[in-house]
Amino acid sequence: MSEPLATSHQGMEDLARIIIGEEELRQKVRELGAAISRDYAGKDLLLVGVLRGVIIFIADLLRAITIPVSVDLIGISSYGPSVKTHGVVRLTKDLEEPIEGRHVLFVEDVIDTGLTLSYLLRTLRARGPASLRVCVLLDKRAHRLIDIDIAYRGFELGDEYVVGYGLDHRQRYRNLPVIGILKPEKY
């Protein structure tokens, strides 16, 4: 049995409150892994995620999946008027694995407007996968502009700006073992 992660991570004191705790995250990832394992049994499954925020979630999900599975990562860069951009998206790192004829599960840490994900799904669909579905840890519908069909959903969140478990603020807090909201003075 694994030991719980220490909650003395530097940065925990910067949180105003914890939204999703360590055990709740572990349990949800186990549930998602079991559902994915059941649904993709006997299929050539490839998990695809976007660098960097998804790394912790996709690693834990990969360990929770009990069937043979491959993983690949892409990198993107968004250009627009602000951090919450509706600007242009471009690939900075493409997939190394071919996806034609494969069952692809796109794994996201958080879906907000859906614009970036919609672009990425169109790009991947053009490569001819056998199937293309979405698994998301955090579904934030408050700003959704494009409807996204989500096959596997971890948690639904409101309009909170959260950090931890891969999510950052100015490249910090990704390593926190929980998902929380920063104190206002830390923004």
Image (cartoon, grey):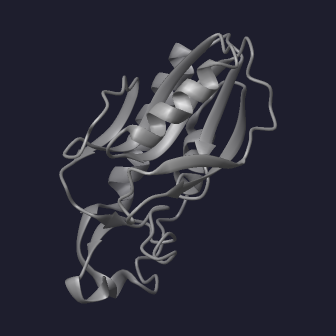
Residue 123 left/right relative to 166: right
Is residue 175 rendered to the left or right of residue 81?
Answer: right
Q: Is residue 39 above or below residue 141?
A: above
Quarter of the C terminus within the rendering: bottom left
Q: Residue at x 32, y 61 (%)?
A: 21
Q: Is residue 136 above or below residue 52?
A: above
Q: Identify the residue at image location x=63%, y=33%.
A: 47
Q: Quadrant of the N terminus?
A: bottom right
Task: Tell me if I can see residue 93 in this picture.
Answer: yes
Camera-side residue: 155 or 25? 155
* Residue 31 in which image quadrant: top left
Coordinates of residue 36 in the picture (x, y in percent): 51, 24
Quarter of the image where one finds residue 18: bottom left
Question: 97 left or right of 10?
Answer: right
* Residue 131 image offset from top left, x and y in percent: 58, 13
Look at the picture and state if 108 lies above or below 84: above
- In the depicted view, which residue is nearer to us: 110 or 153? 110
Locate residue 154, reporting x and y percent.
Answer: 35, 40
The reply, left or right, for residue 26 in relation to residue 75 is: left
Residue 164: % across, % down: 41, 67
Q: Nearer the viewer, residue 55 or 122?
A: 122
Q: Does residue 1 appear in this view?
A: no
Q: Residue at x 22, y 60 (%)?
A: 160
| Residue in view at x 51 percent, y 34 percent | 119
**Is 156 above or below relative to 43?**
below
